[in-house]
Image (cartoon, grey):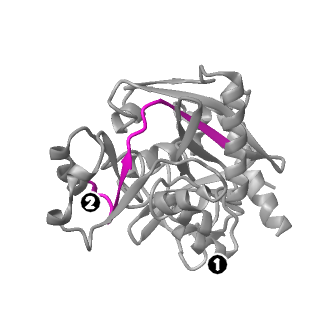
Amino acid sequence: MKKNIAVITGGEASELGISLKSADVVYRHLNKDKYNVFKIVMEGNRWYVERDNPTQTEVDKNDFSFTIQGHKITFDCVFIAIHGTPAEDGKLQGYFDLLKIPYNCCGVLQAALTFDKLRCKEYLQQFGVLTAKGVLLKKKTFQPADLKPESFTYPVFVKPNKNGSSYGAAKVNSAQDLLPAIENGFNYDDEILVEDYLKGTEVTCGVITINGKVTALPVTELRSKKEFFDYEAKYQGQSQEITPAEIEAALTEKIQRTSEFIYTKLDFKGMCRIDYIIVGDSYYMLEVNSIPGLSEASILPQQAACIGINLEKLFEISVEEAIKNATVS
């Protein structure tokens, strides 16, 4: 019998458009011979099944089901395709945990921790993971008059502590540009990181679990045509993404092993992608992406394809691992 799979997307984060694109790709590539696939869209408090005709069937949030022609549909697994809140911060996973419905990504704790860039870095630093130095500014206590731009060594990097896709992020080259960058960042989050700017080679490594084995994918080198790997570089073709990365094989191996270590230490499940910057002989972790982009052009699918895993197989691995983990627990 075919399993019923919900691909849930939407939300209210600034990354809504990216979420919808990822969900569309997942919906199209999940094997319809093996699964009954339904796309669920979240629009605020309204959740509905997106169907081929104009009719939108409401989802019963009491048990995450819907009824069509008198027949109630429940789900064997949920594929979460939401970037930003309420998935990358763990809120949605808590809902599915209460309903005992398996899902394809990490749990509440892992999502909440990795969504908070500063706290995630502080946790991983305990295990020898290198990260950039920085300070945290809170919107509720921040006073422009208290800011001392001269205390920083420029350039610095300003970014929201809990947001993705480089929304609100900026490279600041001079003291006079610091305050405007901070104020812009506060439009996206109530906490802002001001970090040392690390000049080097930016790379990223996806990690997945295949048949119970934590597996680092090939490393991708990111060459941005912009000042840094910002939104336009990520999603509007203003970058080169080279897989496998053109770095020394020994360094690739170290980054892959570190990525598997971080995945394991965080007790991750499903897919994630970990970003680094290489400076000299060292590499610094930038952040952990608990729900990476999943379009045909996204980085993690590129990495999977490099070792012969196409989108259909990648998504099937994710779903089956989730169902198996739920059965074991």
Disc 1 marks which amino acid? Leu
Classify residue 315 by image quadrant. Answer: top right
In the image, the segment drawn in magenta is 185-207
Indicate the position of residue 13 as horizontal and vertical percent values.
38, 58
Residue identified by numbered label 1 = 98
Q: Is residue 39 magenta?
A: no
Secondary structure under badge 1? helix
Indicate the position of residue 31 as horizontal and vertical percent values.
70, 42
**Residue at horizontal 59%, vertical 73%?**
94
Say if residue 159 shows up in the picture.
Answer: yes
Total count of labels = 2
Q: Nearer the viewer, residue 294 or 170?
A: 170
Say the numbered circle drawn on residue 186.
2
Disc 2 marks which amino acid? Phe
Indicate the position of residue 175 as horizontal and vertical percent values.
19, 45
Determine whether, in the image, residue 145 is placed left or right of residue 162: left
Determine whether, in the image, residue 45 is placed left or right of residue 35: left
Q: Is residue 188 magenta?
A: yes
Q: Which of marks 2 and 1 is in front?
A: 2
Placement of 119 over or under 179, stated as above or below: below
Which image quadrant: the C terminus?
bottom right
